[in-house]
Amino acid sequence: MELYELSITFEKEISPLREREIESVMAMSNGYIGTRNSLEEYYPGCDPASFIANLYVKAPGDEFNFLPKIPDWTRIKIFVENEPLNLAGREIIKNSRYIDFTTGTIERNWQSKDEQGRITTVKIIKYISLATKNELGKLLVITPENYTGNIRVITGIDCDSADFGHLLNMNRESDRFAFVQMKTKYSERELKMFHKSSLNGKHKYNIENSYSGSFEEFEWHSELGREYKIKSLCTVNRSPETNFDESMARHATRWKQRWDDSAILIKGNVYDQKLVNFATYHLINAGEFSGNDCSIPARSLSGEAYKGHVFWDTEMYLLPFYILTNPEVARALLMYRYNTLDGARQNAINEGFKGASYAWESTDTGLEEAPEAAILPDGQVIPILSGMHENHISSDIAYTVWKYWEITGDDDFLMDYGAEILFETARYCECLLKKGNDGLYHINSVIGPDEYHELVDDNAYTNYLVRNNFDVAVKAKQKMNIEDEETKRWNHYKNNIYSGLNPKTGLYEQFKGFYNLEYVNLKDYEPRTVPMDIILGREKTQKTQVIKQADVLMFMFLFGERFSREELAVNYDFYELRCSHGSSLSPSIHSITAARAGKTREAYEYFLKNARIDIGNEFGNASGGVHIAAMGGTWMAIVMGFAGLYYDENGFRFDPHLPDEWDSIEFSLKWKGKRKDIYIDRKGIIAS
Ligand code: IFM
């Protein structure tokens, strides 16, 4: 496949205000470790941070646990004739940073001239290995362009940027490599980081150990025009015996395989191709070693927002990508849900119910970790009810377990693990049902995906997903030849849950009483940079039809094959007018449903809005890490929206709606273990 590179360039000066955002969008990860792409010499306002998935910490008395910042392995200090090389106070000839999609590495090219007229060129390449879980690489190339003289480089592991509130520094000295040892304060989990470097050419070598970190120091007399390469390999919880070149080559090979399986090629629009490459880069990175005992947090491992907590984002926005391009990762992510079932069972008990209630915000135990209150920018303290009431997450997980099985045919997973998730979530759903005088079952006091309206009755999304939960649990029982009372009850429920559908108009009411709320013309508030619930205030918003994100449209997308284009269009036209896109999860679903409803122009506008969420900092909060669900949304908007992929257990089909801006799209899918290459242009579809 043809490749385009994404470059985010600073020339001559850095922009401190954008720096944190750039650190996020150019972050690296392999699903086990994640590192923000900070400028290696550090500046005021930078936020260097690395995280390890599943290394959650919590002090006694803390409300919830979170991922702490571990020491930073990307730190480099360079001195020319004892003067520090940095971007401040000297002429910057160039300073550009980009993601290289051919190798899955981050590259920086920097050239500056100091007051003595000495020009130094610096290239830095960094990667987190996709091939070996605990290997991190850093290549520094320094060229004295017009001088000879003394150069000194200090490279290693910086502890000052780590979260000492929760990590204890237990540094031990080593004379063979830089070495940092820490343990988590309250759970006593150990973390060791090793950093071993080599330099071509004669040099003095020294190791500096202090409370602030452990560094290797190289000093040499440089010759004019010669390239000096310092190759550093950092390993986590494993000693650094590996050879740097081999490690980097292994990473590049694995990257190429992943890219080849996952990339989407768009002909006709280079800019859109870059947006898609950017999303695919983060999706590949976030997935590789995630799963089993950890999952992908809402901002992946690229920033501190949401504290490393895992939401429905993973199943509904990321799993489609992994199931269809890299099912092993998808399975591992679902195993995380299986491995946290006990926590989910405990949540159900805490709610006074049976079965399993998955945490709205989950970490390593599966126990509910959502905060109970938040402070708004104006100082107002508001309760957060999602942990207790955003119950749809359990059925979302059940939906995805079944989709995984439909697409992969992985019977072993379904029998050994998935079925238990389906049964336990169905048992929980039973507890949510209340039989009404109309003979139907209702679910009261929930929060649907539209979090602006809390404690609503009969949220159409929740009801639809619960109905599906019973349906797939029954199907799993049938596959296992189990016929019992539960099966009968679930069969009965699934056909008798209130839906909110008006058969005459084809419209679903988002929840009971929604139509009675005040209509607000959102166009009156455009252009707008602030969410509608902040403009109107929380209480007022609840009294209006302003919604935060796709809710009815969300289930119409998930069960796309059940709705005609006309039915979808009726609901799209109604809810699109009312949706304020207060969540990054919203524009992609609008793009997909618009495309499926044949509104290709609108679909394309929503596609751009979604794909630019981090690159364009559309929500103003990319500094806290990338919105990884939106990356999954970009992939889905193309494959499920513009290419129009529909699938079930029996196969897949396409109903394409290419935007005018594109000539063709090309991608591959894994279907029941086999790769299928798809090419779509205006003449038709080729699947091979
Ligand atoms: O899961 C989402 C939710 O739907 C909207 N608020 C942010 C969460 C994390 O991305």
Image (cartoon, rainbow, N blue to C red):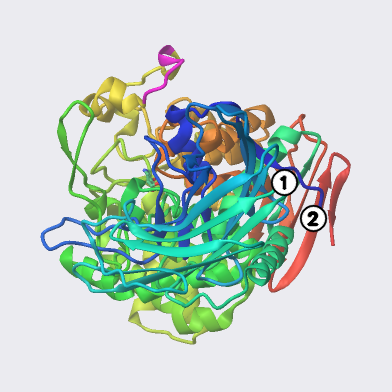
Residue positioned most to the top: 524
Residue drawn where x is 47% and y is 40% of the image: 84
Decide which of 24, 229 is in the foreground and name it: 229
**At which x and y percent is residue 369?**
25, 58
Q: Which amino acid does label 1 sit on?
A: Ala
Q: For mark 1, what is the residue?
A: 643
- If the image is split into quadrants, where does the C terminus sit? bottom right
Q: Where is residue 68 in the image (x, y as percent from the top left)?
A: 31, 57
- Seen from the viewer's position, the closer of residues 110 and 246 is 110
Q: In this view, does 429 lie to the left or right of 584?
A: left
**Who is closer to the viewer here, 142 or 417?**
142
Secondary structure, mark 1, is loop
Q: In which quarter of the image is residue 266?
A: top right
Outermost residue toward the bottom in this view: 481
Residue 589: within the magenta? no
- The chief SS type of the magenta part is loop
Q: Position of residue 235 (x, y in %)?
A: 49, 70
**Quadrant of ligand 1 in image:** top left
Instruction: Name the residue at 12% across, 63% down.
Output: 60
Q: Name the residue under label 2.
A: 678
Region of the chain picked out in magenta, as a range: 524-530
Answer above or below: position of 555 versus 52: above
Instruction: Tell me if mark 2 has few (under 14), some (14-19) or many (20+) residues whose alpha carbon lies within 10 angstroms of its own.
Output: some
Name the kind of residue labelled 2 in the image. Answer: Ile
Q: Is residue 564 visible?
A: no
Q: Is residue 680 above or below residue 413?
A: above
